[in-house]
């Protein structure tokens, strides 16, 4: 299947190229047709102008009105000719930019370019044939360059050597270069004479020996430069290593050392070694094209080799230069948005410090709201910057953006749910940092609240991380919400037999609560009788506290005090069910309270 797809793409590309070539070929034919029509029209206009000028001469000083009419007609003919000529020149210029061109080469040098066919011969074949004829001329031992001439025929200008036609120049060839056919033929003939003469000189033994000598000289210079580079590298390494203690110090900030002196030395030596090889490679690269350019048949290699490096650099530099206006636009957007975000941060800081009050907007909403607004502003800034990014309008950039968006949407659904839950929780205000809360079966102090998770620290010093989606979907009990104003009520239940008067039980429980540290004296603790069961009465002690973070310790101390007070008063606690084998005289009160030790 992949092979079939590749073949289809190849066929489509070939068809597209063929269509483009056919289009250009059709335009060249059209331009040739227009040139033929232009020549016919120009000849007819020339005849007409000659007749008009003859009539003007015959009129002499008589009939001025008729004479002016004839002169206007001559100007109209000249104006029409200029317009047709300008239109053809514009079409030829566009074709010169769009059409494929093929060089005529002699010993690696380009003499001129061929754009259009000659009869049935295509441009590429035409350029190749001309190049072949020129190479054969250079091998002619009896060649005289003065015999290379430009001769005129009815429709072409021919460059010939004796009875051999080297090339023919048509009106279309000349029009593409916006030149006259006769002038272009003379110019090309001179170029050929000079190129052939130079090629014959280059092939001489003396010139060959001279070039070999230049190659040897260049190679010796390269060897010398590389030796000097290596020696300079060694001297630099020795000099830096000798002065290491004086020049290099530890690069540190407070107690953290980013780079020690030894690490700095290793880095400097690595950079020197890298520069050494870069310079050596640069010397070789710059001199190889120079060597190739000495011999005519390798000059094309020199241009290609130099272009391998220079073309990417020139493309990058041109792209950077073209991108500068967009870069300034991005900088303006970033600077303006930065100062606007600073202004927004100032507003929310004032709200958080309660210097600026907005009805219905709580001060603790300011930090999370600022974070949300800042994120939206940065997103808006990126949307504004996106069209100015390099390659933002390319299909690859758009495809990658869509792919990343799909991955993000598929892989972050739970994260987005937690973020939305975190935003909702922020504005519900069920708790804040430092509150003692209970979420499901988890109880602890809130130590961190983000858009994704809520973290609790339990009384056992355990840190629990709960996703915000779980917090939002469950029930949350906040022990600290009203503790500062009204106090939190702690409560515990004991069951006492019917033989103890309820008033004495109430007083004993209240006494036990008042003995307990961290229980408020105001309002006073109170007791509720919650049930009358078969064997005992259920008494619920309620007391107010403010230190909700010590609730476990308070409960423990409260239960200890209840035991002590009840034992002191001789009350047996039958909670929840106390069973023991005993005779009627023994009780469950410890001996230290009953005085029977």
Image: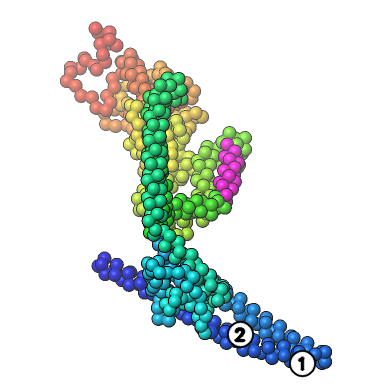
Instruction: Say which residue label 1 marks.
Output: 58
Q: Which one is in front in this view, the residue at disc 2 or the one at disc 1? A: 1
Query: Residue at position x 78%, y 89% from top?
Result: 67
Badge 2 element? helix
Q: Residues within 10 Å of mark 1 (few under 14, many from 20)?
A: few
**Image height of 272 relative to 30, above or below:** above
- Identified at 39% across, 25% down, the residue is 238
Q: Left or right of 115: which side holds 415?
A: left
Which callout, 2 or 1, points at the residue further toward the start of the chain? Answer: 2
Query: Residue 486 at x, y = what percent?
Result: 49, 29
What residue does disc 2 label?
42
Point out residue 88 in the picture as x, y percentages from the top left corner. 57, 77
Q: Nearer the viewer, residue 168 or 241?
A: 168
- Of residue 58 and residue 412, the one placed in the foreground of this image is 58
Picture residue at 19% right of the left edge, 21% below the top = 580
Q: Is residue 285 in sight in this rendering?
A: no
Left or right: where 45 falls relative to 95: right
Q: Which region shows up in magenta? A: 328-349
Can residue 535 be seen in the rendering of this structure?
yes
Q: Nearer the viewer, residue 566 or 448?
A: 448
């Amino acid at each position: 299947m992949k092979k079939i797809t590749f073949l289809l793409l190849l066929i489509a590309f070939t068809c597209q190229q063929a269509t483009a070539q056919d289009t250009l070929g059709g335009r060249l034919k059209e331009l040739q047709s227009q040139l033929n029509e232009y020549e016919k029209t120009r000849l007819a206009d020339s005849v007409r102008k000659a007749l008009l000028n003859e009539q003007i001469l015959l009129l002499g000083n008589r009939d001025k009105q008729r004479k002016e009419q004839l002169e206007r007609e001559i100007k109209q003919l000249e104006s029409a000719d200029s317009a047709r000529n300008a239109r053809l020149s514009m079409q030829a210029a566009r074709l010169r930019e769009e059409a494929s061109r093929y060089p005529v080469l002699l010993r690696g040098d380009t003499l001129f370019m061929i754009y259009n066919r000659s009869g049935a011969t295509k441009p590429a074949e035409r350029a190749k044939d001309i190049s072949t004829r020129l190479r054969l001329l250079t091998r002619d031992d009896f060649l005289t360059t003065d015999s290379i001439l430009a001769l005129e025929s009815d429709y072409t200008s021919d460059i010939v050597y004796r009875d051999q036609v080297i090339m023919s120049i048509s009106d279309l060839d000349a029009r593409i270069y916006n030149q006259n056919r006769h002038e272009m033929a003379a110019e090309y003939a001179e170029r050929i004479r000079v190129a052939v003469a130079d090629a014959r000189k280059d092939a001489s033994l003396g010139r060959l020996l001279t070039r070999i000598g230049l190659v040897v000289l260049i190679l010796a210079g390269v060897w010398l430069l590389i030796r000097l580079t290596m020696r300079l590298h060694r001297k630099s390494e020795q000099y830096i290593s000798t002065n290491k203690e004086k020049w290099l110090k530890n690069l540190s900030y407070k107690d953290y050392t980013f780079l020690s002196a030894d690490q700095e030395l290793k880095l400097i030596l690595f950079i020197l070694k890298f520069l050494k090889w870069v310079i050596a490679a640069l010397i070789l690269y710059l001199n190889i094209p120079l060597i190739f350019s000495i011999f005519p048949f390798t000059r094309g290699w020199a241009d290609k080799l130099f272009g391998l490096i220079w073309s990417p650099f020139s493309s990058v530099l041109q792209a950077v230069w073209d991108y500068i206006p967009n870069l300034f636009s991005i900088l303006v957007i970033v600077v303006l948005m930065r100062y606007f975000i600073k202004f927004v941060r100032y507003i929310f800081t004032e709200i958080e410090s309660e210097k600026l009050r907005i009805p219905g907007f709580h001060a603790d909403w300011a930090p999370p709201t600022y974070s949300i607004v800042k994120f939206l502003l940065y997103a808006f800034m990126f949307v504004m910057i996106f069209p100015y990014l390099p390659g933002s309008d390319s299909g690859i950039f758009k495809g990658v953006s869509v792919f990343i968006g799909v991955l993000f949407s598929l892989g972050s659904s739970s994260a987005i749910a937690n973020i939305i839950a975190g935003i909702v929780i922020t504005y519900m205000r069920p708790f804040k940092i430092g509150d003692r809360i209970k979420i499901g079966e988890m109880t602890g102090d809130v130590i961190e609240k983000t858009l994704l998770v809520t973290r609790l620290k339990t009384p056992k010093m355990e840190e629990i991380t709960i996703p915000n989606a779980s917090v939002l979907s469950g029930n949350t009990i906040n022990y600290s919400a009203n503790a500062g104003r009204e106090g939190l009520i702690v409560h515990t239940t004991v069951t006492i037999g019917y033989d103890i008067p309820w008033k004495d039980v109430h007083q004993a429980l209240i006494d036990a609560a008042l003995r307990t540290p961290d229980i408020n004296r105001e309002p006073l603790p109170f007791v509720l009788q919650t049930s009358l069961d078969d064997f005992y009465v259920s008494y619920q002690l309620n007391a107010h506290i403010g230190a909700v973070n010590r609730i476990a310790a308070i409960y423990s101390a409260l239960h200890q005090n209840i035991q002590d007070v009840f034992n002191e008063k001789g009350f047996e606690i039958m909670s929840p069910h106390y069973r023991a084998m005993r005779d009627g005289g023994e009780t469950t009160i410890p001996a230290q309270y009953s005085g029977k030790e």
